[in-house]
Image (spheres, helix red, strand yellow):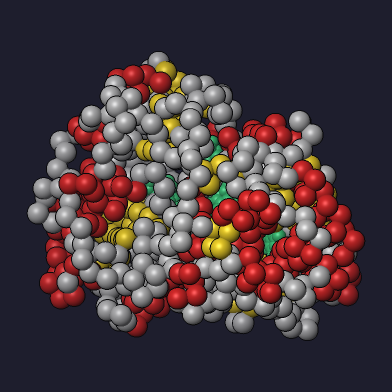
Amino acid sequence: MRKFSICGMCAVRCPIEVQVEDGQVAWLQGNPNDPAMGASLCPKGAAGIAFLNDDERPQRPMIREGRRGEGKWREVGWDEALDYVGSRLRSVRDRLGSRGVALSDRGGPFNDLTKSFMQAIGSPNYFDHDASCGANAHHATRSLFGLGRNDLGYDYARSDHIVLYGRNMLESLQVKEVKAFLKARERGAKITYIDPRFTVTAAKATRFWQIRPNSDYALNLAIIHELLACDLYDKGFADQWVLGLDVLREATRQTTPEWAQTRTGIAADEIRALVREVAAAAPRVLFHAGWMTARHSQSFHVSRTAHVINTLLGAVGQPGGLLPARGVATPTGKKLNRLSDRIPPVGEPRADGAGGVNKHWDPALGVGHQVFRAMDTGLPYPIGAYIVYRHDPLTGFPDPVRQKQVLDKLDLLVAIDVNYSETAWYADVILPESSYLERGNIIGEFKGPSPMLAIRQPAVEPRFDTRPGWWIFRELEKRVGDGRYLDFNSLDAIWEYQLGGTGIDLQRLRDRGVFHGDDKPAPLAFRTPSGKIEFQGSVLEAMGLPSFPPFEPKPLEEGRFWLLFGRVAMQAHAQSVNNPLLNELLNENDVWIHPAPASRLGIKPGDTVRVTSGDRVVEGRARVTDRIHPDAVFMLHGFGRTVPKLTRACGRGMSDQYLQQGKLFDFDRAGGGFTYTETQVRVEAVEAGERP
Ligand SMILES: Nc1nc2c(c(=O)[nH]1)N[C@H]1C(S)=C(S)[C@@H](COP(=O)(O)OP(=O)(O)OC[C@H]3O[C@@H](n4cnc5c(=O)[nH]c(N)nc54)[C@H](O)[C@@H]3O)O[C@H]1N2
Ligand SMILES: Nc1nc2c(c(=O)[nH]1)N[C@H]1C(S)=C(S)[C@@H](COP(=O)(O)OP(=O)(O)OC[C@H]3O[C@@H](n4cnc5c(=O)[nH]c(N)nc54)[C@H](O)[C@@H]3O)O[C@H]1N2
Ligand code: SF4
Ligand SMILES: [Mo]
């Protein structure tokens, strides 16, 4: 039997086909009903059966018995677990009001459910993980266009030149994007890849620049200088759409390619050559504004100037450039009904000030560290309970040691997860969700230049005493809210409600897994206060934030390295390192270090090295390679797990977030993203015999 569903092995959520035989999942592949997907899957997606069959995941609700993180649990039934959470949430609400409850999740196409739950219990404090991921790119896009980062799609397939700043497309991947990107490459599109590290994407590029870490903003200011100084920009487009070209001109008057060369390490001539190439290819050009852009305190401006360059090249709204995204056009024109449409809005201000005192931040996503700030300081008001759903801050946010000090102030920490995440292990209650192959979700809308609806439907029965998220939140709302708003008696009833009046037939959606509306391009429209592309950002400037601040070089202390990190095709963050198949492929990370500093430090390939940041120390194997910039060391993210139940992953490899000491409350003021890559570390060889 074939079932169409949505992969859950990472947050990309690709449409899949599940083949079921005798009640068991026999095969997984991409859903061919989605032409951009075809039957392809990535290695993590293919390891879904191993995840389903793994016993090392929470099997029934658990209530903490010992101290937080001690690992002493009592397994309980669902009624007891939900009653317990319900009564603790009510007591927090009685003491602090509804706003004293916060929830974070991974965001994305299913967050109507979590947002609705928070709305139903009267708290404004829903936030997603974005401060740790795309917040800077998102807010930069908003500041220029008034649109979110996903409201503009990259038209790789028709582009003639794609410029990527550490957007490691082929390893930090999404299946459909990889396919579109490879098509562009086969067609002969040029690819400029800029990264302090040589990656798989670098290997496929036509140009690779090993840039000095944290200096891309200087590079962009020089590219802009050159475009303006040599009149290589699209004047007609700028006249029609841009507000504040003079502000940009002023800010980049001195930022010549020679100026940038000393800051970035990239030769002035090479910068000029790139500028000429992209100007010739315009408007079929893409400067990628990044995805995981929570890196340093000016990352927002790297993303922002990437889009400024797209604008100067007239690539906004053009084939081969950036295309406006839209929602699915349904047969009747009526949008998908949201669960939150049934619930009165919450009037309270958010604890992170997003959309309020911090009006440059998007309240739809929130800025997670500011909710941690509220938990820690009680300002602007206290938070007493925190629910994490499909989110693991102890691996995803920096500095887990500091985080635990904050979490210790909570009355209640609840984790709803399919794995033993680090945060679940530290929680008071674990509510285990059924895996993505054992449950359905609400229908998701995937906006884009070619939008679609997709449905996740259960393929097999749950192996353990786990429940789907929609059921868990319904049951919690019954205990904390008045139980009215999420009171659907089945997932089918939710699906029927969502599709009501759209003219889309549920059975047909279930039979195909996806629904694509027509492919009419959306008109170009900007939602800034002026309706223009605001080089002079009115919201930014109202917040006292400059539209184009001077580049601030980051000083690297003598004998230190920038600690960089990234992903690999066969792992998703920290969540799949214990997967039986993926763990077999890779179960440890190593420390990439350039041969010059390695020889200075007496480090040979394969040696054990000690990496230190403040009082944090980890040890691992050295990989001596000129694929990493001499000022930096690199390690894959996601390793160094500490949960003893994860027998394959626990204690293996190093945790980069552990080394990011002091970074929990250090962030890009404009974009809200963390400053992960401003972490500096020392590296030394561990003498033979010195290891315990
Ligand atoms: N130091 C450092 N920090 C980083 C990064 C880095 O590279 N280095 N990367 C950053 C980036 S880009 C991101 S996006 C974040 C990612 O970090 P998070 O935002 O925490 O996201 P994930 O690791 O994808 O997953 C979080 C949790 O969701 C659980 N989960 C998976 N599927 C399901 C499900 O179906 N139901 C439920 N209930 N739970 C599920 C997983 O088991 C995991 O515990 O980390 C960021 N933080
Ligand atoms: N296989 C796999 N795919 C994934 C994920 C996963 O966990 N596994 N996660 C998904 C998620 S949530 C995200 S956000 C995306 C992230 O996608 P990307 O943003 O592409 O992700 P990263 O791997 O974090 O970073 C890529 C590169 O940035 C480089 N870098 C570090 N500092 C700098 C700098 O100062 N300048 C430049 N130019 N480059 C720098 C690093 O060396 C690294 O090679 O990947 C998504 N796809
Ligand atoms: S990118 Fe891979 S793991 Fe992520 S949803 Fe798609 S197939 Fe699954
Ligand atoms: Mo991310």
| 41 w.r.t. 632: above or below | above
Q: Split into 4 quadrants, where in the image is the C terminus?
A: bottom right
Q: Can residue 650 be spotted in the picture?
A: no
Instruction: Judge by depth and name the residue closer to the eye, 431 or 116.
Output: 116
Judge from the rendering whether residue 630 lies leftward or rightward of residue 184; answer left or right. right
Question: Horizontal and vertical percent for residue 660?
Answer: 58, 73
Q: Is residue 545 visible?
A: yes
Q: Quadrant of residue 682?
A: bottom right
Please identify the quarter of the rendering in which residue 329 is found.
top left
State left or right for residue 280 relative to residue 393. Answer: right
In the rendered view, tell whether residue 227 sits above or below residue 175.
Answer: below
- The picture places residue 322, in percent across and down from the top left corner, at 59, 45
Residue at the image position 78 percent from the left and 84 percent from the top: 558
Residue 440: percent from the left, percent from the top? 32, 34
Give left or right: position of 157 versus 274. Answer: left
Q: Nearer the viewer, residue 555 or 390?
A: 555
Please provide percent x and percent y for residue 609: 74, 69
The residue lying at 64 percent from left, 69 percent from top is 246
Camera-nearest residue between 579 and 8: 8
What's the residue at 64%, 62% (across, down)?
305
Quadrant location, ligand no. 2 = bottom right
Q: How many marks?
A: 0
Q: The N terminus is located in which quarter? A: top left
